[in-house]
Image (spheres, helix red, strand yellow):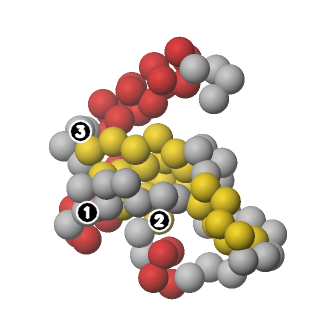
Amino acid sequence: MPRQAGILPDPAIAAIMACSWSEALALAREKNLPQVYHDCDTDIYGACHEGEPQGSFRNGIFSEHRCICMPVSLSPEELAKKEKKFRTENPEW
């Protein structure tokens, strides 16, 4: 699991992190969470509640990460296709 320097992993958070859209969907369904995300700053996938910010704390300051969030109703293929389309249309993001 990728980590930022100086950030210790929290077992409660690590439980909802994944390495792909497929794994994120499985975790979301297991935890009954409505959304999956791809954190583009850390290249980690995961599951979350709607509107839940993703990021990290450094020196007590929260830094929000750039994430692509989508509903669990989509298939892994649909998630990947939508992410690719978004990134193609928004290369600066």
Q: Which residue is mark 1?
A: 33
Circles 3 and 1 in contact, beta carbons < 8 Å: no
Residue 74 badge: 3
| Residue type indicated by callout 1 | Leu
Tell me which amino acid carries mark 2: Met
Q: How many marks?
A: 3
Disc 2 is placed on an element classified as strand
70 lies left or right of 5: left
**Circles 3 and 2: CB distance less than 8 Å?**
no
Residue 75, given in percent of the width and then of the height, sits at 25, 39
Q: Callout 3, which amino acid?
A: Leu
Look at the picture and state if 91 lies above or below 42: above
Q: Viewed as shown, does residue 28 lie left or right of 40?
A: left
Q: Quadrant of the N terminus?
A: bottom right
Q: Position of residue 36 (x, y in %)?
A: 36, 51
Q: Residues within 10 Å of mark 1 (few under 14, many from 20)?
A: some
